[in-house]
Image (spheres, helix red, strand yellow):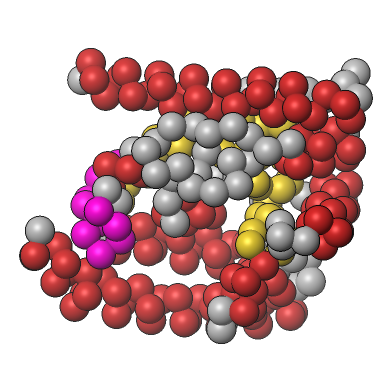
């Protein structure tokens, strides 16, 4: 265990910091030059994949063909800070993430995220949160997918907690499908935190889209629970595979 901690602080953390600074600078410049945010999205993807390789984390994607051609709201379970890296690096679509607003204040990294058209949200203030969801809806109507973690916080035990309705009200309002995404393996990799991160494999399973046609805004709660069951089922199936292996 001590060896992993030394590896993190002496090798992985310094190299990761340099990568983050370089990609943060490139992302800020790219976002200013390309207002569509696509260039910054490509840089973020490359940054994420390089960091995961540095941390010796392998990511496999299942069901990539389930991702629709048009915009959608992607909803994933949330177990650690690695989830964002995993999805930025390996979710095979152009998307913008809805993220906690304080991240925007982080030099370079936060600035590039904000400049790249991602959507900050402050859930402590309902009016501001509503305006953020309106901004996310504009992204969807313009043809760009949105990624959200509807649990609202990280699950420390790997279980899929109840989904908040905001992600699903967004999909219903914009008239786009919801794509359930199950992430499995994160807890084994970061069981004792990033400083004691273990090399390992993470699986991302993309389920078929859940259509919203014919549903009303009042169906947001029911849609949230339907998608939560799909995400939880996908995660449970991968857990059973691991037990049988």
Up the image or down, 90 lies above or below 158; here it is below
Up the image or down, 110 lies above or below 49; here it is below
Identify the image quadrant of residue 35: bottom right
**In the rendering, at what x and y percent does residue 98 appear?**
68, 55
Residue 167 belongs to magenta span: no
Identify the image quadrant of residue 149: top right
Residue sitting at x 37%, y 64%? 51
Q: In the rendered structure, which segment of residues is drawn in magenta?
A: 192-202
Residue 196 belongs to magenta span: yes
Residue sitting at x 71%, y 48%? 146
Q: Is residue 23 visible?
A: yes
In the rendered view, does 242 fall on the left or right side of 26?
Answer: left
**In the rendering, at what x and y percent does residue 111 appear?**
64, 78
Identify the image quadrant of residue 123: bottom right
In the rendered view, does 38 fall on the left or right side of 26?
Answer: right
Residue sitting at x 35%, y 73%? 16
């Amino acid at each position: 265990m001590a060896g992993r901690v030394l590896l993190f602080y002496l090798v992985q953390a310094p190299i990761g910091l340099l990568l983050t600074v370089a990609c943060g600078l490139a992302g800020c410049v790219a976002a200013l030059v390309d207002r569509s945010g696509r260039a910054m999205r490509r840089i973020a993807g490359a940054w994420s994949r390089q960091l995961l390789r540095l941390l010796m984390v392998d990511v496999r994607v299942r069901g990539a063909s389930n991702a629709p051609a048009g915009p959608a709201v992607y909803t994933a379970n949330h177990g650690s800070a690695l989830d964002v890296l995993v999805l930025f690096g390996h979710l095979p679509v152009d998307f913008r993430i809805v993220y906690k607003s304080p991240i925007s204040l982080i030099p370079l990294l936060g600035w590039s995220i904000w400049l790249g058209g991602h959507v900050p949200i402050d859930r402590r203030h309902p009016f501001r949160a509503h305006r953020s969801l309106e901004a996310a809806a504009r992204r969807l109507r313009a043809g760009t997918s949105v990624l959200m973690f509807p649990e609202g916080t990280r699950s420390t035990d790997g279980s899929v907690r109840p989904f908040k309705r905001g992600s699903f009200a967004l999909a219903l309002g914009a008239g786009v499908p919801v794509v359930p995404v199950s992430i499995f393996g994160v807890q084994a990799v970061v069981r004792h935190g990033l400083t004691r991160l273990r090399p390992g494999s993470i699986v991302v399973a993309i389920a078929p889209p859940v259509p919203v046609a014919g549903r009303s805004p009042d169906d947001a709660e029911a849609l949230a629970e339907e998608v939560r069951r799909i995400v939880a089922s996908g995660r449970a199936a991968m857990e059973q595979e691991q037990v049988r292996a």
